[in-house]
Every structure is written in C-alpha cells, then in structure tokens.
Image (cartoon, helix red, strand yellow):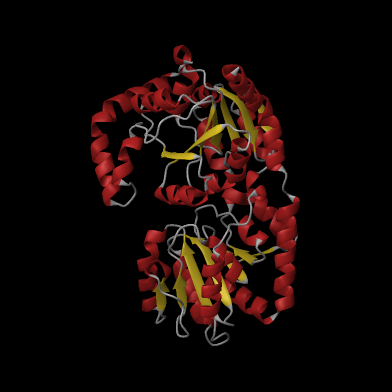
Amino acid sequence: MAKRLPVTLRIYRVLWALALPLTPLLFWRRLRRGKELRERLPERRGHAAFERPVGPLVWVHAASVGELTSVFALIERVRAQQIEVLVTTGTLTSAVLAAQRLPRNVIHQFIPLDAPRYMRRFLGHWQPDLALMVESDLWPNLVIECSARSVPLILVNGRLSEASFRRWRRLPRTIAALLESFDLCLARTPADAEHLTELKAPRVITTGNLKFDVAAPPVSAEKLQTLRTAIGKRPVLGAASTHPGEETLVIAAHRMLRKRLPNLLTAIAPRHPERGSGIVEIAAANGLKAVLRSRGQMPAADTDIYIADTIGELGLLYRLASIVFIGGSLVRHGGQNPIEAAKLGAAILHGPYVANFSDIYAALDNVHGAGLVADAETLADYVNAWLRDPAARTAAAEVAHNTVMALGGALERTMHTLEPYLMQLRLGQRAANA
C-alpha cells in the first residue's frame, strides 16, 4: 500500500513524525483533564503491558463504550473457539467497562496514538493474525501499518453517517486507499453498505446491526435491591447518557411535574460521569435537592434528582425507571443507543437529533414504541401522561421490546462471514501443535 499512498496520507504520516516530540505535552494536558491514566500512558506509545499470548490472536478495536458494548458477544464467540483476543479502546470509560465485562482471559490495552512509530511498536509486539475494526474508527496509520504487515483487516458493524460520507467524498483517493486495505467491510445497514461501496470499499456485505443482539446489561442483584428499597414506591423518570444542556431540560421538566407528581424521582446518568457535580449545581439553582451515586449517596425521601455518575450501571437505571429519556438527542449530538432500555422494558423518550441511530429510532417511532420530545415542556407532558396511564406506557414499552428483539440476527450473520478467517486460524494452530 505504501507505494500507492495518496499525497494526503503521505502528508499525514510526515506530520505525525514531526509532532512526535510534542506528544508528552499532549499526554500532560490529557492527564490534567482526567482523560488518561498515568500508569497506562506507555500503552498510548505502543508499549505493551502484557506478553503476547501463544497461538492465534484476534485484535478487536472499539473506539469507546458504545462500540465496545456492541461486540461483547462477538468477542465471547471468538474466544470460545480457543482463539486469543486482544481488545483496544481509546477512552477511560471504555477501559472501566472492559474491566467490568470482558471475559477474564481477554486482554485489554489502550490504543496507541496514530503515529507510525507507535503503531509499528504496537503491531511488532502483538503480531495479530486478524484485526476487527468496529464501526467507523479508520485511523490512517493503523490501517497502513496493518497493510504493510499483511494483517487481514475487517470492518465489523460498519457505519458511515451522512456527515462522514460527505467529508470522505471530498477526499476520494484518501478513503479509497484506506478502504482497499480491508478484506471485508460488514455494514450495519444497506445505506451504510451503499456509502462504503461508493467510497470504493472493494468487498461490502450487509450483516445488520450488532447492537440489536447486545444482551441486557447485567446488574448486581444486591445493588438493585438496595436502590429499590431506598426508592420505595416512588415513580422514577430516567435520563440516560445525557449531554451538556440536556440535564438543564430534564431538571426543568422535573420542576414542571412537581405539582402533578410530587413524589417523582428523576435519575440522571450523564454520558460523562465526571460531570456529576455540575449537575448537582444545576439542580440546586432550580431549588431541587440532588445527590451523587459516586459518593455512595442513596435517594432519600426528599431527594429530587439522583445522579448516577458511575460507569457500567445503566442496567440499574433501566430496571428502576419505567420511563427513560435517551440522551444525546435534545442537543445536536446524534443520539445514544436505546436498545438496552427497550430490552429491559422501559418506555422510551427521545429528542429529534438521532442521526447516529436513525434506523433504530425510525423502527421504534414507526410502531409507536417511543415518544419524540422537543423540549422540557413536551418531555414533562409525555411523562405525566404515561405515569397517569400505565396501560399506554406498558403498551409502548412492549412494542419497543418486541421491535428490537425482532431486528436481531446480526451476530450470527457476522460470525458466519468471519468463519473462514477463524477456521484458518484454527487450522494453523493445529498444524503448529502437530
């Protein structure tokens, strides 16, 4: 691939080489902002924290929490074939989730910065036999260095938003040079497949969205019961994976509902848990009492807002709240994933900005399995109506549950497509052991 690199990618590689002396400053800034772990910074430079396991190794790269969650089942299926698995992610929250939910015999590392030297160091140590890139994380030097080493690359659960598609279309030779290095691109939807094909991906198959096959998030039975006891019979409105600006609207909706539903408890789980203290201040400015789960606090009788500023506990929220607003959708973020909430029987509300999950929300909205809200007023109106009409709320939740369950099957299709690659790894291992 190196001989045919377009000018844009050559410049990208040169710029990374020139910027390498500045990476300590970058790491310092990220440490100050709480975005890195000091003890794991060597991983960001391609240094491994573990020895490479013996035998065939599949490398799975998932950028953050959503991508990682979508491939837990896939990772378990690959590992069940006695094939070693290395997982990389790029955020602290995803690292915490990996520690909580990855099988114990799966290795997790932070992805190195996309500098040629770091990527070569990373690949030189791990020497993966197959690399699975999740969704849309196409790091140029990662792809180039894998290609140089003849590591088979497969894009799984591939997606390309309209915005990303338009950006890449302005650089046709660049994206074509990256995509031609992939053995396969397994697309979530026909629209994603069409975009990838138009950008010159050579082999594209539509396998469906792995997120429909994600199991409901596990919870500690003890923690769940403790929270249920603390909440008692109070109705609970959940707000999951909220982004800046949305907590203000959710809290405003809670204030509007106080006269009609004086016993209401609103539980907010911000997308970035470190923002919990700021949400307490928003609640206080509105005359409401808020407590933080990260400090071990439990909702008392006079608690208005319970802030679940922890990682990996959305399963608790979805089991406790009969109505859940899914965040990232009242601000121009693109929406967060509603599937887990639907699988656990919550009635779902969302805003208009859901481009990241447009197919899922379209499926739910078309069968009245979710409610569309535009502001604090409509959010409050929906919550009031559903809490006063449990039959309507239950009907919406059941429709949502049935819809997401019916759209499953991507895991089996993905595994079927990967089987020739996994069989080759198994046969190679048998030959080495003979």
Is residue 141 shown above or below 413? above
User: What's the residue at 70%, 66% (across, down)?
Assistant: 397
Query: Can residue 162 be seen from the camera position used here?
Result: yes
Q: Nearer the viewer, residue 141 or 432?
A: 432
Is residue 189 shown above or below 277? above
Q: Is residue 294 left or right of residue 17?
A: right
Residue 373: x and y in percent read 60, 66
Query: Can residue 374 be seen from the camera position used here?
Result: no
Q: Nearer the viewer, residue 31 or 84?
A: 84
Residue 416: x and y in percent read 71, 33
Is residue 356 shown above or below 263? above
The quarter of the picture where residue 368 lies is bottom right
User: What's the residue at 75%, 60% (across, down)?
Assistant: 367
Residue 280: x and y in percent read 38, 72
Of all residues shown, which one is farthest toward the front? 434
Residue 429: x and y in percent read 59, 22
Q: Nearer the viewer, residue 76 or 179?
A: 76
Q: The C terminus lies in which quarter of the figure?
A: top right
Is residue 97 shown above or below 222? above
User: What's the residue at 50%, 30% (across, down)?
Assistant: 170
Q: Nearer the viewer, residue 182 or 361?
A: 182
User: What's the residue at 54%, 85% (across, down)?
Assistant: 263
Total marks placed: 0
